Amino acid sequence: MTDTASNISLVTTARRDLLKVAQTQDPHLTPEGLRARQRAEVEAIRARLTVAMPAEPTAPDRQPVLDALAPKGADDIALQAHQWSKVRALLDAGRDLPSIIRDADRVRLAAILDALETMPEVLEDSRPAEVVEFIQGAVWDRLVQVDPAAERIAAIERTNAPAVAWRTILEGLIATGEIPFEGRVLLSEVDADALTLLDEGDWEAVPAGAPTNLVASLVEGLDRATVDA
């Protein structure tokens, strides 16, 4: 279970504190001394974020559901081949694969998955791996609608999604000092209102007038110095 309000406060406070550290000036310190002070303060912020990190949920395994689509005997093989011939005819007639998937039953989805990597439409694309990944995602989304086992997996994934989104945000913040794009996308899919509140809080914590990438530059510089030392 994730506490949205607490996570927003945690992130925006960390961003405000990181900006403050990045803007720190102390005439009584040498450049090396100032750097050491900044490093200690950044590590304290990182420790605070790490302690508050939501527990990593156990991801359910989709593979057994996908493996169950494989034909069990000669009758299943013939049925799957028949379905693929229909899919091929629809493609040749001008239908696009995503629209075919949206109406497919479980057997047709199995046929599409089985033929996917050797389809001319995939092999002739300039980025075949990306096409395969996209189509596999579309097949899974449809499978969730027509296969109870897939829906059970999807239900667990939906339950896990808030923790996954906030972990991605916090891990990115710890690593770079920035709210990662991937985390923002995941949060928008789970809770668009939470993302709006996070953005509003971040705009207050790191105002538009602050030097661009000041926080990221600080964190990157400290980490690079640590590696080079």
Image (cartoon, helix red, strand yellow):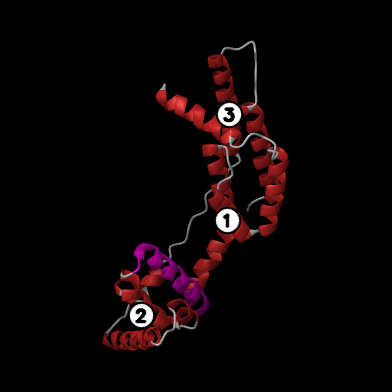
Q: Earlier in the sequence, mark 2 or mark 3?
A: 3
Residue 95 placement: quadrant: bottom left
Mark closest to the chain's N terminus, 1 or 3: 3
Q: Determine the residue positioned at 55% across, 15% down.
A: 31
Question: Which quadrant of the structure image shows residue 190?
Answer: bottom right
* Residue 88 image offset from top left, x and y in percent: 35, 84
- Tell me if 138 is positioned left or right of 194 in this view: left
Nearer the observer: mark 1 or 3; the answer is: 1
- Disc 1 target residue: 185
Across and down, in percent, residue 84 comes to 34, 84
Q: CA distance from mark 1 to mark 2?
A: 31 Å
Residue 98 vertical placement versus 128 (above, below): below
Residue at 71% x, 44% y: name it. Answer: 201
Determine which residue is flagged by label 2: 111
Secondary structure at badge 3 equals helix
Provide the residue span drawn in magenta. 125-147
Up/down of 11 relative to 222, above or below: below
Is disc 2 placed on a helix, strand or loop?
helix
Residue 151 higher or lower than 77, as above or below = above
Disc 1 and disc 3 in contact, CB within 8 angstroms? no
Report crowding for label 3: few under 14, some 14 to 19, many 20 or more residues within 10 A (C-alpha).
many
In three-dimensional space, the C-alpha distance between marks 2 and 3, rounded to whole angstroms, equals: 53 Å
Q: Position of residue 168 (x, y in %)?
A: 54, 48
Q: Residues within 10 Å of mark 1 (few under 14, many from 20)?
A: some
Residue shown at 69%/53% (left/top)? 196
Mark 3, residue position: 42
Q: Is residue 137 magenta?
A: yes
Residue at 35% x, 68% y is: 125
**Residue 163, visible in the rendered structure:** no
C-alpha separation, residue under disc 1 versus residue under disc 3: 26 Å
Please rate how many residues cluster around mark 2, counting C-alpha atoms within 10 Å: few if below 14, some from 14 to 19, many from 20: many
